[in-house]
Amino acid sequence: MRLVAFTAGLLWTIELALVLFDPLGVVFVLDFTAFRSWIVPAADGYAMPPGSYHFSNWIMTVDQNGNRVTPAAVDGGARVLFYGDSVTMAWGVGDGVTWPNIVTERLQLDGANYGRTGYSAAAIDELMQATSGEACVVFLSVQNDAAILGDLPTSSTPGYKPMILRYVDFFRSLNGDGPQDLAAYDAAMRRIASRPNTLVLALGHDYAETAAAYGALAVPMYRHRIAAADAHADVAGNRELADAIAPLVSDWLTGRDCAA
């Protein structure tokens, strides 16, 4: 009986410590579960209804077009659409500190954030074809863009789950990247690269060497990430991205007509 009580007390102590401190940042799993319950199916993958979405310690606002808001957008500035996956959407940080918003503010752009968490290059290509028109486009590609977009939307409402079990889920998930479709990736990257008024960027030196075949310019990997379990850029990491990307976009826009 004493052993049972000791074990129960120990588990309760561990649970409380994980909830209060979350040393690896596994709250990311909880946030992503909530995210999956909010999104709805769309032709290219999923969509988010307009509104304000409250995560563990950050808020994301989605506009009427299903895009993350870009508060710094300037009416009359060069119209630039930012495409990419969760790094472009800027998972884990507030609307005003995403790198697309910082670049928009620095360059006085009429910017819009078309980043979509989990999107592959193929899904981004479909979204771009459907939404970009003749606008100027900046596409930040990352290492896992060859992965196949999973079946993200779910109607299930996230319920309570002990943090200990969330840590178990996290360690079970450390099995590498998901399945890839290299043919679809290559076709999508070629279509995006051949699109007029399109700047293709590649995150990280190693990946940039691969993406150079599609005319991509290298963007250094950010050093500041949200947590061990969440490799997305934190506020400082988004500033790092903006510092690297803003000059590239500024040079690229020189002499280019990017009217709305």
Image (spheres, grey):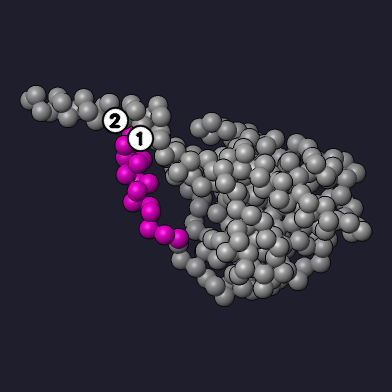
Q: Position of residue 42 (x, y in %)?
A: 61, 55
Q: Residue furthest left?
A: 1
Q: Looking at numbered disc 2 in the image, what kind of residue is underneath it? A: Ile
Report if residue 240 is visible in the image.
yes
Q: Which residue is mark 1?
A: 163
Label 2 with label 1: CB-CB less than 8 Å: no
Give the quadrant of residue 76. Answer: top right
User: Helix, strand, or loop for circle 2?
Assistant: helix
Main SS of residues in magenta: helix
Q: Position of residue 58 (x, y in %)?
A: 57, 33
Residue 124 vertical placement versus 172 (above, below): below
Q: Which residues are magenta?
A: 162-177
Q: Earlier in the sequence, mark 2 or mark 1?
A: 2
Q: Position of residue 109 (x, y in %)?
A: 83, 45
Residues 67 and 139: in front is 139
Residue at x 83% of width, y 45% of height: 107
Residue 2 vertical placement versus 190 (above, below): above
Residue at x 38% of width, y 54% of height: 174
User: Helix, strand, or loop for circle 1?
Assistant: helix
Q: Looking at numbered disc 1 in the image, what kind of residue is underneath it? A: Met
Residues 154 and 1: in front is 1
Q: Which residue is mark 2?
A: 14
Q: Is residue 183 magenta?
A: no
